Amino acid sequence: MKAVERKEDKQQSISDADVNASKLVDSSDGLAPTCQEIEIRAYSIHLAHGSNHGNDFDDWLQAERELTEERSLGSKTPRKI
């Protein structure tokens, strides 16, 4: 019986994590960039930096930061890299 309870607890924890994760990617406020927008900007940054490998995470974070800043300032024009 305890094994069943543990399994249910794990399922509940996973469900809670799914709900919390979906809140992180919710861009319904209009300010948060979508994953596709970040991906496109990150790729542009990657190319601008000479396509050097190993900087994908930094490029992603930079792209996310730039897009968020642009939206919070009300700018619709993309920044030049």
Image (cartoon, rainbow, N blue to C red):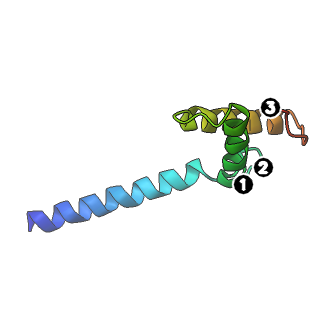
Q: Quadrant of the N terminus?
A: bottom left
Q: Residue under circle 3?
A: 81
Quick check: marks 3 and 1 in contact, CB under 8 Å? no
Label 2 sits on what residue type?
Gly
Q: Which mark is residue 43?
A: none
The residue to which callout 1 is attached is 28
Closer to the chain start, of discs 2 and 3, is 2
Q: Nearer the viewer, mark 2 or mark 3?
A: 3
Residue type marked 3: Ile
Element assignment for label 1: loop
Find residue 31 and report its horizontal and vertical position in percent: 76, 44
Q: Are marks 2 and 1 in contact (CB under 8 Å)?
A: yes
| Residues under numbered marks 2 and 3 in contact, where contact means CB atoms less than 8 Å apart | no
Q: Secondary structure at mark 2?
A: loop
* Residue 22 on image: x %, y %: 54, 55
Viewer-nearest of discs 3 and 1: 3
Mark 2 Cα within 10 Å, few/some/many (few <14, many 20+)? few
- Residue 13: x and y, percent? 33, 55
Residue at the (59%, 33%) spot, across then down = 52
Residue drawn at (71%, 45%) of the image: 32
Residue at numbered disc 2 = 30
Q: Is residue 18 above or below residue 80?
A: below
Left or right, 48 with respect to 3, comes to right
Q: Is residue 51 left or right of residue 80?
A: left
Q: Residue at x 49, y 57 (%)?
A: 19
* Left or right: 33, with 2 as reference point: right
Dot 1 amino acid type:
Ser
What is the CA distance from the residue labelled 3 to the residue labelled 1? 27 Å
Residue nearest the viewer, comparing 6 with 22: 22
